[in-house]
Image (cartoon, grey):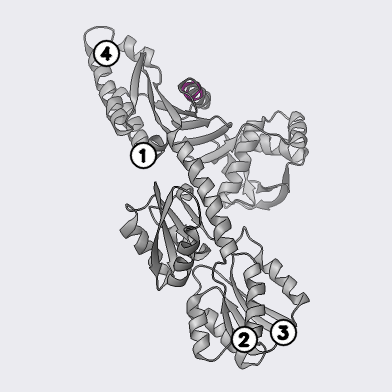
Amino acid sequence: MYKVGVVGPMRSVERILLYAKELESNLSFVGYSYDIVNETMDIMERHHQEVDFWLFSGYIPYKIAQQSKYFSKDRMEYIYTTVNSFYRGVVETSYEIGKLAKDVSIDILHIPENNYAEEMADLDKLLNNVYIKEFTSTTAIGEIIDYHLALWNEQKIDMVITVYPTVEEKLKEKGIPVYWTGPLKLDISHTLQLFSEKIRTFYYKETQTTALVVQVKDFFQIKMANNNGYGIHFLLLDMKKIILQLCEKVDGYLIDESNGRFVLFSSRGIVERNINAIFEMIGRLSAETDQPCFVGIGHASTVYYAENYAHQALQHLALKNAKGIVVMQEDGEITELIEGSSQVTYTTRVQDKELIEKLKQTSISVKIFAKIEAVINDMKLEPFSAKIIAKELNMTERNAQRILSELVKVKLVELCGEENRHSRGRPSKLYKLSK
C-alpha cells in the first residue's frame, strides 16, 4: 500500500482527508498541516522518508515544493480549484449579508497553464464590478490584504473572495464579508481520481524492465595496444569491477558481451533513481580506458524489447559521436543526457499529417524538428538563435542556421528579429516557433 502525504492549511488538509476516505484504492493518506505556506519545505525535509507520494492542497505549496531536492513531478500533485468555488462564494456570502453582492474583490494565483482570470471575467455578467488581484507564490500576504482593504475602505466592494485562509481571518477581524475558496468536494474527488491513476502509471513505470548497454569506444584499438602480456586482462578486470559496482547499486544482472560492451538488466524505477551513479561509472570507465564511454538505456515491457531499445539508443549516441546517455521507450520517446548540453526529451512518432508534409519539403527529419521543439519549449526560449540550437543539439552553428532557414521556408519557424553582437559582423537572426 502506498502512503500519500497531504500538505496544506489545517482546514484544507482535514477536508481532503475526509473525502479521501471515500476513495476506493490501495492508498493511505496522512495529513501534514502548516500555519505558513513556506513551512512546506520543512515538512518535506522531515517526512520525505515516511511517504511515497505528496498531495498539496493547492498550487502555492506545490510551487514551493518544486524548490526541494525531494521534488518529483511523478510523485506529486495538487488540488485543482475550479471557477465553481468563486460562484459558490458569491451566493453563500450574499445570503449571509442579506443582499446580492454586486461588487466583489477576488485574489487568484497566477498559474500559466490555467486561465482563471479569463473565467473570472464571466462574473461581470452577474455582478457590477469584479476586482481581481493576481499574485504569485512569492507575493506577500500583507500585499493581498492591503489590496482588498483599500477597496473596502473606498466603498467599492461588498465582499471579498480569497484563496488564503490567513487573508480570510484578517479581513473578518475588520468586519469585512469574506469567503475562503477552499478545495470543494468535487475538486478534491476529481484530483484524487486523477492522482490515483497517476500512481498506477508510476507503479507500471517503476516495474518496467530496463536494459543498459555500456560501450567503451574503440575498444579494439585498446586491445591492439595491449596485445602482449597481461595488461589487457588486468584492464578488463578493472572495467568489470566498475560495472559490477553499478550493477550492485541498481540490483541488476550483468552480461559481459566482450569487446568493451556490457549489458545490465534491472527495473526502470531503480535505474532512474541512480542516473547520477551511471554518470559516475561513465567517468570512471573513461578515465580507466582513456576512451569515451557511452550508455544506451531501454525501457520496455519485456527483456527482449528493453535490450533492443537500449542498443538503438547506443547507436543513436554513436552517430552523434557524443558522450553521455540516451534513453529510449516503447512509445517512441527519447531522452538525451549529453555532456555539455541540457537534457532534452522528444518523440520520434508524429501523427500530425500537415507537419509531416511540410517536413517532406525539406531535408529535416521529424526527429530533428521534434528535438528543436522540445529544447525551445523546455527552456522557454522565445526568441532563440541558431547559436543556441547549435549548442543544445551539439552541432555546428552553420548547420543549425541551415536547418532553421529550411524550417522558415515551410513556415514551421518564423524570423522575428535580430540580435546585435558585441564583436564585428552581421547581427544574429532571431526565430520563434510558428503557432
Amino acid type, mark 4: Ile
Mark before the other along the chain sequence, 1 or 3: 3
Q: Residue at x 78, y 75 (%)?
A: 125
Secondary-structure class at tag 3: loop
Q: Quadrant of residue 257?
A: top left
Q: Give the crowd class for mark 3: few <14, some 14-19, many >=20 residues within 10 Å.
A: some
Secondary-structure class at tag 1: helix
Q: Residue at x 38, y 64 (%)?
A: 32
Q: Position of residue 67 (x, y in %)?
A: 43, 58
Q: Give the crowd class for mark 1: few <14, some 14-19, many >=20 residues within 10 Å.
A: few
Mark before the other along the chain sequence, 4 or 2: 2
Residue 276's tag is 1
Q: Give the crowd class for mark 2: few <14, some 14-19, many >=20 residues within 10 Å.
A: few
Q: Left or right of 239: which side holds 410?
A: right
Amino acid type, mark 3: Lys
**Cα–Cα span, label 1 and label 3:** 57 Å
Q: Quadrant of residue 178?
A: bottom right
Q: Verify whether residue 42 appears in magenta.
A: no
Q: Position of residue 308 (x, y in %)?
A: 50, 21
Amino acid type, mark 2: Glu
Nearer mark to the viewer, of 3 and 2: 2
Nearer mark to the viewer, of 1 and 3: 3
Question: Is 45 rendered above or below residue 151?
Answer: above
Name the foreground residue: 53 vs 117: 53
Instruction: Give the magenta range.
Output: 305-310
Name the residue tied to disc 3.
102
Q: Position of residue 292 (x, y in %)?
A: 39, 26
Amino acid type, mark 1: Asn
